[in-house]
């Protein structure tokens, strides 16, 4: 393909010959000049490296976490005796960050490695196939294109940042609304270890023998019995597709659910996962051990929010058939939508006799913003009034459900995982299972 440089050259030559024609130059001279220029350009094209002298290898991760930046490495082997200037576009999906075209230079008779950064904001499985590579001739008058087939499948999974943070520093997740919740009945749990006494520990658990021996105040630490059953319920209905600052409600719920699963599996509990909308979409039976986290991740990473409303009654009825053992039912859903489902209340009353139920949703920041906003005209006053009415309804219905032992909690999107894990640990430590 001709480059802008070649087109500009031909325009300059043509303009020069046009001006010279007024001074009586012959047609022979004009044809000869054009022939010389064309011969020079084709010679430049002929002497440029052949496509077969170029080979490519792309290296990118098989799994990418949502909205996390990764480096993709492209190895370009130039087997010719000429350096080339190139630009390329990779066949990334449109939802990916695409820093193209990418410009660079490949040295002669050697391999050149270039890297670019990309990020995927939407979960799912994607196929990255072709690479579109263009390089210029020595004089830059022509540009050759080579399309390379390099098929690669990439899975975009939920952001595991909070899961990794918990596994590295669990104490960070033991705080909820500024109050330490790692408390338990003194008669519940088994001895774990002896550690240094810190402010807030029960003085009755001081180990006086070790204190006298080490000349430091030491205390016994107990932990709950392991092997409890945790069932994570993930709503994939219409309201879970509502966009947030980063991703949507389903994205944040999945990331929080995986963090809770990691916390429970690390403590030796059994974890099951049930994702649903109109019906059951995914069910992962109870499993134990950190390897079960990969099973859960593979099952739920590609979940999408449906356009239909969730059918809580059908799902809770199905749950009674598959979960016979007493467990903690941790539901990630939209609280406001759930409160309108009176049919679910009958099923939950039966489930409550055997299981512990806790629902966690994402706080509606826009609703709180409208309530705090000072009205300036009639319209803003009406908006604030409706927002206050919605908040009163939500609080009234939540109180009605909580009186029947069905607890509901809302958290800010950035604190969803912390809130879920801290409440899970609180329930376990209080021996409610």
Image (cartoon, helix red, strand yellow):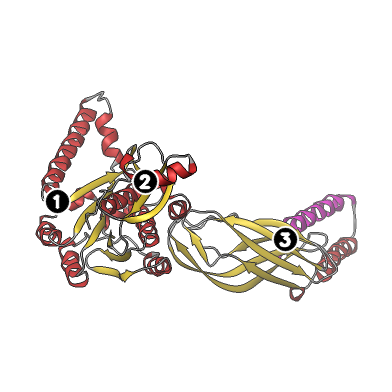
Task: Determine whether label 3 and label 2 are within 8 Å by CB.
Answer: no
Q: Is residue 311 above or below residue 371?
A: below
| Residue 219, picture quadrant | top left
At horizontal 43% and vertical 52% (from top left) the residue drawn is 166
Give the magenta range: 1-23
| Residue 346, picture quadrant | bottom left
| Neighbours of disc 2 within 10 Å: few (<14), some (14-19), many (20+) | many
Q: Secondary structure at mark 2?
A: helix
Q: Which residue is mark 2?
A: 174
**Does the magenta portion include 426?**
no
Residue 86 tag number? 3
Q: Secondary structure at mark 1?
A: loop
Horizontal side of 170 relative to 96 (left or right) equals left
| Neighbours of disc 1 within 10 Å: few (<14), some (14-19), many (20+) | some
Residue 405 tag number? 1
Mark 3 vs 2, N-terminal side: 3
User: Could you say where residue 17 lies in the image, as x and y percent from the top left?
Assistant: 84, 54
Q: CA distance from mark 1 to mark 2?
A: 23 Å
Q: Is residue 69 visible?
A: yes
If the image is split into quadrants, where does the C terminus sit?
bottom left
Residue 52 tag number? none
User: Could you say where residue 328 lies in the image, as x and y percent from the top left?
Assistant: 24, 59
Q: Is residue 245 visible?
A: no
Horizontal side of 392 relative to 169 (left or right) equals left
Q: Secondary structure at mark 3?
A: strand
At horizontal 24% and vertical 32% (from top left) the residue drawn is 371
| Neighbours of disc 3 within 10 Å: few (<14), some (14-19), many (20+) | some
Q: CA distance from mark 1 to mark 3?
A: 66 Å
Task: Determine whether label 1 and label 3 are within 8 Å by CB.
Answer: no
If the image is split into quadrants, where does the N terminus sit?
bottom right
């Amino acid at each position: 393909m001709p480059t802008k440089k070649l087109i500009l050259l031909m325009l300059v030559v043509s303009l020069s010959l046009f001006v010279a024609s007024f001074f009586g130059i012959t047609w022979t001279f004009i044809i000869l000049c054009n022939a010389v220029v064309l011969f020079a350009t084709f010679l430049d094209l002929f002497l440029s490296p052949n496509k077969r002298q170029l080979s490519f290898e792309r290296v990118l991760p098989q799994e990418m976490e949502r909205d996390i930046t990764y480096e993709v490495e492209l190895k370009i082997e130039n087997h010719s005796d000429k350096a080339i200037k190139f630009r390329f576009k990779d066949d990334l999906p449109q939802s990916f960050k695409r820093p193209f075209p990418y410009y660079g230079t490949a040295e002669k008779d050697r391999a050149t490695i270039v890297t670019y950064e990309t990020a995927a904001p939407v979960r799912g499985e994607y196929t990255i196939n072709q690479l579109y590579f263009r390089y210029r001739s020595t004089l830059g008058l022509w540009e050759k294109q080579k399309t390379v087939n390099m098929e690669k499948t990439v899975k975009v999974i939920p952001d595991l940042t909070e899961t990794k943070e918990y596994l590295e520093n669990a104490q960070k997740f033991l705080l909820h609304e500024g109050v330490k919740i790692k408390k338990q009945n003194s008669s519940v749990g088994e001895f774990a270890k002896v550690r240094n006494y810190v402010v807030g520990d029960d003085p009755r658990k001081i180990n006086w023998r070790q204190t006298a021996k080490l000349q430091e105040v030491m205390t016994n630490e107990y932990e709950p019995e392991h092997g409890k059953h945790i069932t994570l319920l993930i709503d994939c209905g219409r309201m879970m597709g509502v966009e947030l600052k980063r991703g949507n409600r389903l994205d944040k719920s999945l990331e929080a659910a995986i963090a809770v699963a990691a916390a429970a599996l690390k403590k030796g509990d059994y974890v099951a996962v049930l994702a649903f909308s109109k019906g059951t979409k995914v069910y992962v039976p109870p499993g134990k051990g950190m390897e079960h986290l990969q099973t859960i991740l593979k099952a739920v990473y590609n979940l999408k929010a449906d356009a239909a409303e969730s059918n809580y009654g059908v799902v809770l009825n199905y749950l009674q058939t598959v979960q016979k053992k007493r467990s903690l039912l941790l539901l990630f859903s939209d609280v406001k939508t759930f409160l309108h489902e009176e049919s679910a209340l009958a099923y939950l009353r039966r489930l409550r006799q055997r299981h512990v139920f806790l629902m966690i949703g994402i706080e509606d920041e826009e609703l709180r913003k409208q309530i705090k906003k000072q009205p300036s005209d009639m319209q803003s006053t009406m908006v604030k009034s409706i927002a206050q009415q919605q908040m009163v309804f939500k609080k009234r219905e939540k109180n009605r459900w909580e009186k029947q032992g069905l607890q509901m909690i809302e958290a800010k999107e950035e604190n969803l995982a912390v809130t879920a894990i801290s409440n899970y640990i609180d329930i376990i430590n209080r021996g409610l299972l």
